[in-house]
Amino acid sequence: MADDLRVGILGYGIGGRVFHAPLVASTPGLVPSAIVTANPERAGQARAEYPGAEIVPDADALFARAGDLDLVVVSTPNRTHVPLALRAIELGLPVVVDKPFAPTAAEAEQVVAAAKAKGVGLTVFQNRRWDSDFLTVRKVIESGRLGDVFRFESRYDRWVPKIKDNWREFGDPAEAGGLLYDLGAHIVDQALQLFGPVTQVYAEVDRRRAGVQVDDDVFVALHHANGVRSHLWASALAATRNPRFRVLGDRAAFTKYGLDVQEPQIKDGLRPGDEGWGVEPEADAGTLGVDDGTDHTETVPTEVGRYEDFYAQVRDALRGEAAFPVDPAGSVAALRVIEAAHRSGTEGRVIMLDYQSGQQ
């Protein structure tokens, strides 16, 4: 279509290949126009999957075509998020930045300020706000059936006993590697979305696998300004399945097992609109109620996952019809919590935050 918005995708690793390119291509009104990868195998795969896109070897080649693009997606190693986002903004190109937004909150604020100064659209790919399980938790909380919620528990566990040779496992702080930046960027963001700003952060940040350079087993406790406490776990050494979510209120509790299926579905070739897209197994449905010996509980059907909503809102924002789907200020706030968690884990104490400024 003549009015399709042209998207340049920086990076064709897991982020670009599994998330951004498929979701962009599935969004009416958006089209992958250029894809950056220096890897010959990935370049061949990109050409086969997106024959209408130009495959270029580096960021310079993409930015040389800035006049032919309407949006740039930064899906590259964490250390490059800030410089690449700033280059796009300087050229007047709206930007989607993958999570974590930046290695530090200060750098993230630099990007936000640059976008504001240039009047350029900026958003962060916090895709797990559209996970089926998280959408279900939000719906249950908003229903009021839990009463006053006082504790939120979230686990994002994996079983990865062998260290991988990629930047997510590199120890240089500039890489923003480790679980707190990787999975923590999701679970902290979700907690902030549900319960708002944080006043206290306590964390246990460990390295459990032999030879690992970054945190691979973490626990974070947050005290929100509204009084709710969030307990968040992430581990690369979780060999059994634990509840993904447990939410406690003064009238009932909600427990949910299983993880959103959209990522494995994309890897298997499924796309938004296909039959079964975003639908979790019925066995993973959550339980709501009170189990006091008489089992006053009920099964809560899981919402359908909707990753496609992110790029549909980006498209509408580019057309001036809506706001961008994720306010980057929320991702800055999550980075401040992650930084406080790292400090807490190092110093073995609670870190206080000014919930209005987010400063320690």
Image (spheres, rainbow, N blue to C red):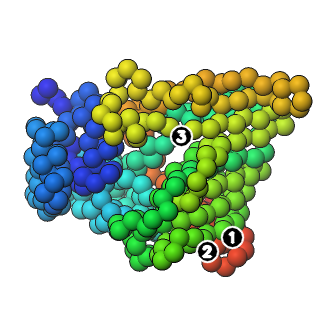
Q: Residue 231, position in %: x, y?
A: 69, 54
Instruction: Find the distance from the CA under tag 1 to the CA under tag 3.
Output: 30 Å
- Work out whether mark 2 precedes mark 3 in sequence or the reverse, and give the earlier one: 3
Q: Secondary structure at mark 2?
A: helix
The image quarter in which residue 243 lies: top right
Q: Secondary structure at mark 1?
A: strand
Instruction: Find the distance from the CA under tag 1 to the CA under tag 2.
Output: 8 Å
Kindly tell me whether residue 292 is visible in this rendering.
Answer: yes
Kindly tell me whether residue 68 is visible in this rendering.
Answer: no
Instruction: Find the distance from the CA under tag 2 to the CA under tag 3.
Output: 29 Å
Q: Quadrant of the N terminus?
A: top left
Is there CB contact under 8 Å for labels 2 and 3?
Answer: no
Question: Can you identify the residue that label 1 sits on?
Answer: 351
Decide: few, some or many residues near mark 2? Use Cα within 10 Å; few <14, some 14-19, many ≥20: some
Say which of 170 and 209 sits in front.
Answer: 209
**Residue 259 - label:** 3
Q: Quadrant of the C terminus?
A: bottom right
Is there CB contact under 8 Å for labels 1 and 2?
Answer: yes
Q: Residue 165, position in %: x, y?
A: 35, 68
Q: Residue at x 65, y 61 (%)?
A: 219
Disc count in the image?
3
Eye-nearest disc, 1 or 3: 3
Q: Amino acid at mark 3?
A: Leu
Question: Can you identify the residue that label 2 sits on?
Answer: 343
Say which of 160 and 40 sits in front.
Answer: 160
Is there CB contact under 8 Å for labels 1 and 3?
Answer: no
Q: Amino acid at mark 1?
A: Ile
50 relative to 298, above or below: below
- Work out whether mark 1 precedes mark 3 in sequence or the reverse, and give the earlier one: 3
Q: Residue 29, position in %: x, y?
A: 23, 29
